[in-house]
Amino acid sequence: DAGVIQSPRHEVTEMGQEVTLRCKPISGHDYLFWYRQTMMRGLELLIYFNNNVPIDDSGMPEDRFSAKMPNASFSTLKIQPSEPRDSAVYFCASSLWGPQETQYFGPGTRLLVL
Amino acid sequence: GQQLNQSPQSMFIQEGEDVSMNCTSSSIFNTWLWYKQDPGEGPVLLIALYKAGELTSNGRLTAQFGITRKDSFLNISASIPSDVGIYFCAGDSNYKLTFGKGTLLTVNP
């Protein structure tokens, strides 16, 4: 199995631009998670899906952030418009049957907003 | 929101030494997990604990789920250079994981 796939691995953009991060979970996993990691705040859960349906989006910072999962093998996290404080590493993870069991993380997308 | 206090923030040890790190919380968690993150990679699960008082080993790693369900520790015995990385504790409550800030471990050969 290829594991969780994220793209791009690195993204540099200017303030105000739209950013789209992509994730392909492990095949057969029903749960997909988006996390953000910064030095100041550590690893934070933004949103998670079960069977393509958003279950908890209480961690999404504000309306500039949106996430979708149109099918079982693809999810996007979009930031529009982006701001410098959005600079972080964004991780996607998936698990077979729930948040409390093994979550398999992707390699992350390192985002820098200038 | 819930917070996990993880300590120490960083450790510098010699190869062969044992390591201990812990996590505490003011909230009760149903599950405690320990992850390791290598540079440029995502976290990888090391050990999962599902019952209060549970003690689980995985090779040189040992972790325990505190009786009060508000704490957990991770021990690494006979450290080796590849143990270098950031170790995170995570607690599950209401089907959502909360992560600690991590312990950065450096092992000198």
Image (tube, rainbow, N blue to C red):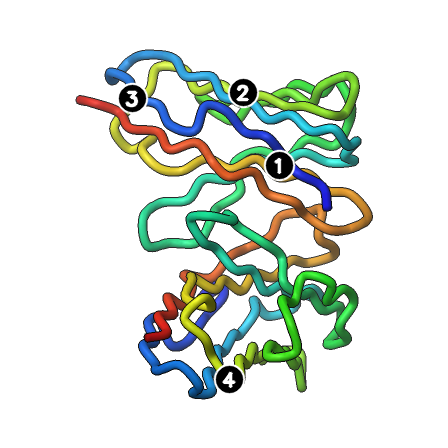
Query: Dots 1 and 2: beta carbons under 8 Å?
Result: no
* Marks 3 & 2 on one chain: yes
Q: Nearer the viewer, mark 3 or mark 2?
A: 3
- Position of residue A29 relative to residue B1, above or below, is below
> Quick one: label 2, few (<14), some, or many (20+) residues within 10 Å?
some
Amino acid carrying mark 3 in the image: Phe
Residue B62, labelled with which disc?
Answer: 2
Amino acid carrying mark 2 in the image: Thr
Q: Which residue is mark 1?
A: B33
Q: x and y percent of residue A111 in the render?
A: 38, 70
Q: x and y percent of residue B9 in the render?
A: 43, 29
Q: Residue at x 73, y 63 (%)?
A: A58
| Chain of the residue that carries numbered disc 2 in the rendered image | B
Amino acid carrying mark 1 in the image: Leu
Q: Nearer the viewer, mark 3 or mark 4?
A: 4
Q: Earlier in the sequence, mark 1 or mark 2?
A: 1
Q: Which residue is mark 3?
A: B12
- Position of residue B107 relative to residue A104, above or below, is above
Q: x and y percent of residue A70 in the render?
A: 67, 86
Q: Which residue is mark 4?
A: A81
Place residue A47 in its image quadrant. Answer: bottom right
| Chain of the residue that carries numbered disc 3 in the rendered image | B
- SS at mark 4 in the image: loop
* Marks 3 & 1 on one chain: yes
Cα gap from disc 3 to disc 4, whole angstroms:
41 Å
> Quick one: label 1, few (<14), some, or many (20+) residues within 10 Å?
many
